[in-house]
Amino acid sequence: MTAPALSAQQSAAVAARLASAKGYTAWHAGVRRDPLMRLFTEAGRRDRYRIYERLRAEGPIVRSSTGLLSVVSHPVADGVLRSRDVSVHTGNPSEGVLDLSLLELDPPDHTRLRALVAPAFTARRMLVQQERIATAVDRLADDLAGRLAEGPVDLMAAYAKPLPVIMITALLGIPDAHVAALNRYGDAIGRALDGVASLAHFREVAEADAGLGSLFAELIEVRRREPGDDVISQLVRAEDAGTLTRTELTALARLLLVAGFETTVNLIGNAVACLMDRPDLWKRLTDDPDLAERAIDETLRFDPPVQLTGRTPTRDLDLSGRRLPAGTPVIVLLAAANRDPEVFARPAEFDLDRPNPRDHLAFGTGIHHCVGRPLAELEARLALAALARRFPHLRRAGREVLGDGMVLHGRAELPVRA
């Protein structure tokens, strides 16, 4: 389905708004030399971890020249995320572009909708998913072996991207015929978390939103006639029972789809990249693939796929002796908190023997803790272990290409050879 075309007047209004936002970012990043705003420039994204340390040197909470507060302290970040006196609404550029369901809802609506999808990610359901993931991983590894026999391969396209798409479409009950379109839609929506980048991107997001709306409308009617054990069928039953609306159902399905593969793709790619840069650790993993679980935990701490989130206190807060005024948007830099030396010894070191890697905040915490965490960790662990078993001599085969997002961080291309 194609989104309705913008009129000339609408296009001009969107272009003007985007130009204003870019000018605002450039002014504060370049002229005011604001480190937080520099993160949202191309150069800043490539230098994100040094910028986090520059912010840390200024204190656990730093006020931007824009008025925003940024948090790099693990204890303060943990306190903000756990507080019931904060809202997820921050005035982020992505707000209003798409309905991102749980990501943009406070209780009680957040509580109601989360309760509808949480059963899909229980330990019992993950045991069922584990067999399905293992089968998909073996199939992808077989295909990867054939490609590697012919020369270098982009691991992202050949391995990291297909697995999460296979799993989330199966979980939601989406037919395989839609996979190519879903990849395109997911990319457009994922990049919108940083804000719409251009008029062309705005059109891509509108097309993705329309396409997903059409796909889910069709799928909802199919599942109403032929219910299964997939998540869409569960949500259709909830709609029929009057516990959620059609708009909420579609938004929730969209969020699960995009969050279900964009973050996991990056987690797999980031883990492999970290290990390729440390051949001694890769050797340890190939000797003992069970270390994949620790490698994934440390990747989530060291180079997480979700780098930040936002909150706004609804009343004045005092966290770890620091005051956060009501109504002031707070950018919680999850990746910076994960390298807080007060919590993690030698935080800039990728360490498979770290005693507390799971103290990371990569999935958030509190009531907005990522509901799909069990599935993401399971997929990444099995995917990494399979690579270690099947391709012990895997190496980089060229320069990686980083993705162009700030909120979502990962590799767009990761060339490897065996």
Image: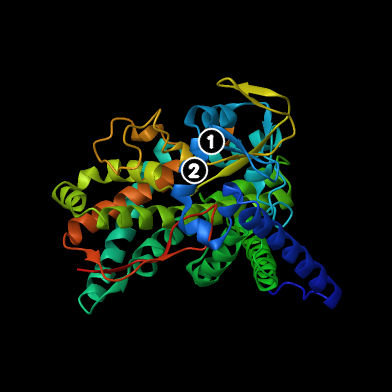
Of 93 and 234, which appears nearest the observer?
A: 93
- Quarter of the picture holding the C terminus: bottom left
Q: Secondary structure at mark 1?
A: helix
When the figure is inspected, residue 291 is found, relative to residue 404, above or below; the finding is above
Residue 371 seen in render? no
Place residue 24 in its image quadrant. bottom right
* For residue 375, side relative to residue 418 (left or right): right
Residue that badge 2 annotates: 54
CB-based contact (under 8 Å), mark 1 and mark 2? yes
Residue 219 seen in render? yes
Residue at the spot x=29%, y=65% of the render? Answer: 139
When the figure is inspected, residue 297 is found, relative to residue 391, above or below; the finding is above
Residue 282: x, y in percent?
A: 20, 52
Residue at the spot x=68%, y=49% of the render? Answer: 92
When the figure is inspected, residue 88 is found, relative to residue 271, above or below; the finding is above
Of 390 and 38, which appears nearest the observer?
A: 38
Residue 171: x, y in percent?
A: 48, 53
Residue 414: x, y in percent?
A: 35, 66
